[in-house]
Structure formats: structure tokens, C-alpha cells
Image (cartoon, grey):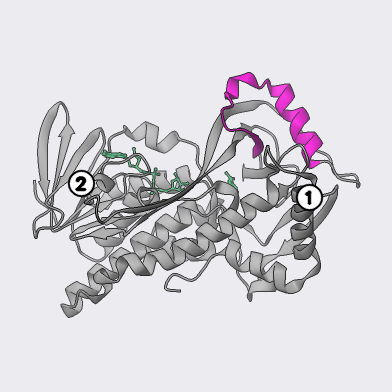
Amino acid sequence: MRTTVGIIGAGPAGLLLARLLHNAGIDSVVLESRDRSYVEHRQRAGILEQGTVDVLREAGAAERMDREGLRHDGIELRFDRQRHRVDFPGLTGGRSVTVYAQTEVCKDLIALQFKEGGPLLFEAEALAVEGAGSDRPRIRFRHEGREDVLECEYVVGCDGFWGVAREAFPESLSRVFERTYPYAWLGILADVAPSHDELVYARHDRGFALLSMRSPSVSRLYLQVPADTDAEDWTDEAIWDELERRLETDDDWRLARGPITQKSVTPMRSYVHEPMRHGRLFLAGDAAHIVPPTGAKGLNLAVGDVVTFARALLHERDTGSPELLDAYSATCLRRIWQAERFSYDMTSMLHPGPGDSPFDARLQLARLGRIASSRAAETDLAEAYTGFPLDA
Ligand code: APR
Ligand code: PHB
């Protein structure tokens, strides 16, 4: 088998890249180790930055998102039993975000790929990338019980944090920057209308809580829990009781309960692999970087990476100049480190850590109080939340 761009992984990064290349007349093959149903049903985040929405529209992949996505013009910060709303358009010159689940983005892109795109092979596991430093990189993979080789001009590793593409970087080239957190998120999906029309990020001495949603009738909520928590140790009633305590306010706001249809624990990690390119092998999305979910940046960073790669490849095709491909890693990393910083700031401001002192708790409240009382501090949050420009 032979193609121009070999893509490993059919998460949002790999699927969107295949779509962007198809639209530009460049062929690709996507190899995905899991089956279609698994990819279409795993629960992930659901906040699309304005720039991500624009990219999906330009790619012709936004028909259902435009119908079913919910435009959100702000978030609420909750602390000390008080509420503070951050108004995005007013602070950023009109920007907002859209609530539309990552699984839905993947379903839409898979359907388009099968309708009009190039090959997308499920249950095709990449085993290794070979010859990354040469003109003819190859992906060795296993599909339907047989080993095969995909010969490429470029390979893009969109294979997530646990993928194999990163392993093809020489040890002497790779640098890893990493931080783990002593807590995780217990997330639930519940068949109940969201108790607020915007997302609520709550800091409480008992831990962080987040109220989010998937649709006007489905709520998505999270609780900060110790890192080694087993979701099955939490009964539905205990989850609702704890959410209620942490989200409680002094006014008449109430949390509505409903049947919990899914629960799982998400670990928290910050991770960056530098550089993101070795020869003709490029990394994109979670394969190169992870952020803790508090800033809702994971999916949006993946989109930024593949847009940057697709533009760079087109630039080379149209002008013969590899300058943008050569700049790929540095271009992506500038934006990634801003998102790493923001995600870390949001996480450390809202989560009381197990070893924190009363001084630490007061500092978190002071940081929140600063956002609630200074337009400059609030603008900083709103700009970061709605998204840094792609070529910043
Ligand atoms: N061969 C083929 N496919 C693989 C391999 C392999 N060896 N290893 C992993 N994969 C697949 C996974 O099964 C997964 O479908 O690569 C895909 C990677 O997708 P994601 O993990 O969704 O990563 P990405 O596309 O970069 O999207 C980032 O996902 O984890 C969230 O919060 C994150 O929203 C962000 C987004
Ligand atoms: C979600 O809806 O899953 C979600 C929303 C905001 C976040 C993280 C997750 O910061």
C-alpha cells in the first residue's frame, strides 16, 4: 500500500486531518486500532472554541454541529457560595464557544470520510513507524490478522497519548515536560436537563465541581476525587449529594437530579513532547501533548495542530517551499504552551490539593476574587477560554 500522507489514529486529530487533505486534493490513509463503534462512543470533552467551529465549517463538516451545537456566551465561576459570570463576547470582541461533544465531531467526520474521503481502516493497528528520517517513511501495521506496510511521503502520528508514533523519535532528540496531579475527575452523564444554561466551574474546600452538558436534556458533571479513585466506589446518591454540596450557593439555585447513565474517572496530567517533528514524521494532538481538562483545551489543540500541518503541506505543494513544514513544531508549540499555562492556572486555582495549607486556600480565593473584580483579569481568562489565534 502507498499514499501521500499516512495518518495513525482516527480521533479528532486524524479524522479532521484526513478531511482537510481530501478537500485540498491530497490523498491519505487513516489507520485506527479500535473498531468504529468504540471510537464513536467513548466519552470525551465537548467545548469547541470559536476557531475550531470555524475550521469545521470551512471543512464542510459542520452541518449537524450548526443544528445541534449550543452556543455559549459565558461561564460561571462559583466560590464562597457566590456566583460570578464571565461574559465572553463582551470581553473578547464577540467570541464565544460551542457545546458539541467530541464523539459527535468524530461521528460526523467518519461519516464524511466513508462518503467521499480516502481509506479509513478500523481495527488496523500501527506497530511502528520506520524510516522517519528518510524520504520514504513507512508504517508497519496489522489488519485482519495480517501484517502489512503503508509507504508514505509523510506520516502524521495522531495516535493519542498511548500511541506508537512518538517512539520513532530518537531518544537524543526527544524532550519531555510533564506534571501529574494528585487528583482526578469523576465524570457522569445524566438524563436530566442542565441546572444552569452555562457551564459552572466551582471551587469548594471539599474539592472542585463542574456542571456541563451535552444537550438540553443531558447533563455532564464532574467531581474532583483522589487520583486512585474507582468510579464504582461512588453510588449515584453519593455523587449527587457531593455535587450539591460543592455547587451550593446563597441564593435559590438548585441542582436537579436524574438517572446517571455513565460514570468514569479521568486522570489529570500536563505533558509536552518536543519537538513535534522528526524528518517526515509529525506528531499532532494528544500524541504530542496533554492538558488537564479544566481549560477544555485538548480537542482544540488537536485541531490547531492538524490545521497547521495541512496548511504547511499545501504551501509546499503550491510554492515548492518547505518553510512552513520546517516551522511546524515551533508554530504549534507556541500555542500549545499558552494552553498548557492556561490549563494549569485554571486547574491550580480551582482544585484544593491534598497537602494544601489554609494559606493555599486563601490564595485560590484571592485569584478568583481578582477575576471577579478586575476587567483585565477577567479578559485574560475569556481570551484564553475562547481560544488563542491559530498562528499566534
Ligand atoms: N495504531 C492505530 N491507531 C492507534 C494506535 C496505533 N498503534 N494507538 C492509538 N491509536 C488510536 C486510538 O485508538 C485513538 O482512536 O489513535 C486515536 C487517538 O485519538 P485521541 O486519543 O482522541 O487523540 P486526538 O485525536 O489527538 O484528540 C485529542 O482527544 O483525548 C482527547 O482530550 C483529548 O480532546 C482531546 C482529543
Ligand atoms: C465537558 O463537558 O466534558 C467538559 C466541559 C468543560 C471542561 C471539561 C469538560 O473544562
Amino acid type assigned to the residue bearing label 2 in the image: Pro
Answer whether residue 70 is visible to the viewer in this image. no
Figure quadrant of residue 191: top right
Picture residue at 32% right of the left edge, 65% below the top: 329
Q: Quadrant of the C terminus?
A: bottom left
Q: Residues within 10 Å of mark 2 (few under 14, many from 20)?
A: some
Q: Residues within 10 Å of mark 1 (few under 14, many from 20)?
A: few
Q: Of the numbered discs in the image, which one, if any, rests on residue 285?
A: none
Look at the numbered disc 2 and give the secondary structure of its residue.
loop
Left or right of residue 17, residue 77 in this image: right
Q: Residue furthest bottom?
A: 319
Picture residue at 31% right of the left edge, 41% below the top: 163
Q: Is residue 236 inside the magenta stretch? A: yes
Q: Quadrant of the N terminus?
A: top left
Examine the rendered structure and indicate whether residue 301 appears above or below residue 210: below
Amino acid type assigned to the residue bearing label 1 in the image: Phe
Q: CA distance from mark 2 to mark 1?
A: 56 Å
Q: Is mark 1 within 8 Å of ligand 2?
A: no
User: Pointer 2: what residue?
Assistant: 119
Left or right of residue 164, residue 336 in this image: right
Look at the numbered disc 1 and give the secondary structure of its residue.
helix
* Magenta span of residues: 219-247
Figure quadrant of residue 305: bottom left
User: Pointer 1: what residue?
Assistant: 359
Examine the rendered structure and indicate whether residue 125 appears above or below residue 284: above
> Which comes before the other along the chain, label 2 or label 1?
2
Residue closest to the eye, 113 or 210: 210
Q: Is mark 2 within 8 Å of ligand 1?
A: no
Give x and y (percent) for residue 22: 25, 59
